[in-house]
């Protein structure tokens, strides 16, 4: 029993280390198998990132103008994650928009030299998040951040589970996939995060947000598949960001 609990703790901390810059215990074991099994905790880590953003929002709202408090909460997520998924969105947008042939698109993503299209994609995404979250009441915004970040990570998990990697070598062996059991755990963690928002905003708001996340996240996945025949690590970042943004859009439409 203790060994099983210890293993789950290791998997959680591996997920935290992979997705964030938060401190983790030293000496964690690491292997391809463990990284794949740790993917089930990605939505949980997303909820943790969202919870940290919500704390910043709660602390800033009483003493700062509301848009400033929201902006600081978004900045907190960038600091905690090292803009991990935003960098993926920038690379994916640059390659998928500026590249022509499949090989050229993938090469542009690998170079991580972001230009106009990448900057515009990240800038517009952050601006839309700021405007949308600032339109919510404080309680809805805080719970929405937790749910939105969890749902965004679930979108990336879903892409790895349902879509082929665009490369047969290289990045493919470094980008975690997910097992069937892991997918179910990831979905359960996402539903728990959504339950928190349900208590605050109601089931209709949650359903509308979830539908928005699915539509925008799947639209980005379909774009990637149509251009390069699958996904890369950068496309996972793009799918996460689009699903998170879609969640806030759906929530705003309901409210």
Image (cartoon, rainbow, N blue to C red):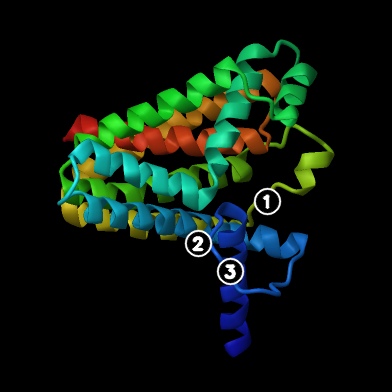
User: With respect to residue 81, does 212 lie above or below?
Assistant: above
Q: Residue 255 appears at what percent x and percent y?
A: 16, 35
Mark 3 Cα-neighbour bin, 10 Å: few <14, some 14–19, many ≥20 = some
Q: Is residue 112 above or below residue 183?
A: above
* Residue placed furthest toward the bottom: 2
Residue at left 34%, top 46%? 73
- Determine contact: label 1, label 2, CB under 8 Å: no
Left or right of 65? Residue 150 is right
> Where residue 214 sits: x, y (%)?
42, 35
Q: Which residue is under mark 1?
A: 176
Q: Earlier in the sequence, mark 2 or mark 3?
A: 3
* Nearer the observer, 230 or 170: 170
Task: Give me the residue at 83% from left, 40% from top.
Answer: 170
Residue holding disc 2: 185
Please report whichever mark, 1 or 3, sits nearer to the chain's N-terminal start: 3
User: Residue 44: x percent and y percent?
Assistant: 46, 60
| Residue farthest front in this picture | 63
Residue 206: name its quadrant. top left
Tell me what residue is drawn at x 30 percent, y 57 percent.
55
């Amino acid at each position: 029993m203790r060994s099983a609990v210890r293993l789950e703790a290791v998997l959680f901390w591996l997920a935290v280390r992979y997705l964030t810059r938060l401190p983790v215990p030293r000496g964690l074991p690491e292997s391809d198998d463990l990284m794949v099994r740790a993917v089930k905790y990605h939505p949980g880590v997303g909820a943790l990132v969202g919870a940290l953003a919500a704390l910043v929002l709660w602390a800033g709202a009483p003493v700062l103008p509301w848009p400033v408090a929201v902006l600081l909460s978004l900045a907190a997520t960038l600091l905690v994650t090292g803009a991990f998924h935003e960098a993926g969105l920038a690379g994916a947008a640059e390659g998928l928009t500026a590249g022509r042939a499949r090989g050229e698109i993938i090469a542009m993503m690998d170079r991580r030299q972001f230009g106009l299209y990448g900057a515009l994609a990240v800038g517009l995404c952050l601006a839309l998040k700021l405007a949308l979250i600032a339109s919510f009441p404080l309680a809805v915004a805080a719970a929405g951040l937790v749910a939105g970040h969890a749902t965004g990570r679930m979108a990336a998990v879903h892409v790895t589970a349902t879509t082929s990697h665009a490369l047969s070598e290289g990045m493919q062996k470094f980008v975690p996939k997910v097992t069937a059991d892991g997918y179910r755990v990831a979905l359960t963690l996402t539903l728990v995060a959504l339950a928190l928002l349900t208590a605050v905003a109601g089931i209709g708001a949650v359903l509308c947000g979830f539908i928005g996340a699915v539509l925008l996240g799947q639209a980005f996945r379909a774009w990637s598949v149509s251009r390069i025949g699958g996904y890369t690590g950068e496309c996972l970042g793009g799918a996460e960001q689009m699903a998170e943004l879609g969640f806030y859009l759906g929530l705003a439409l309901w409210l």
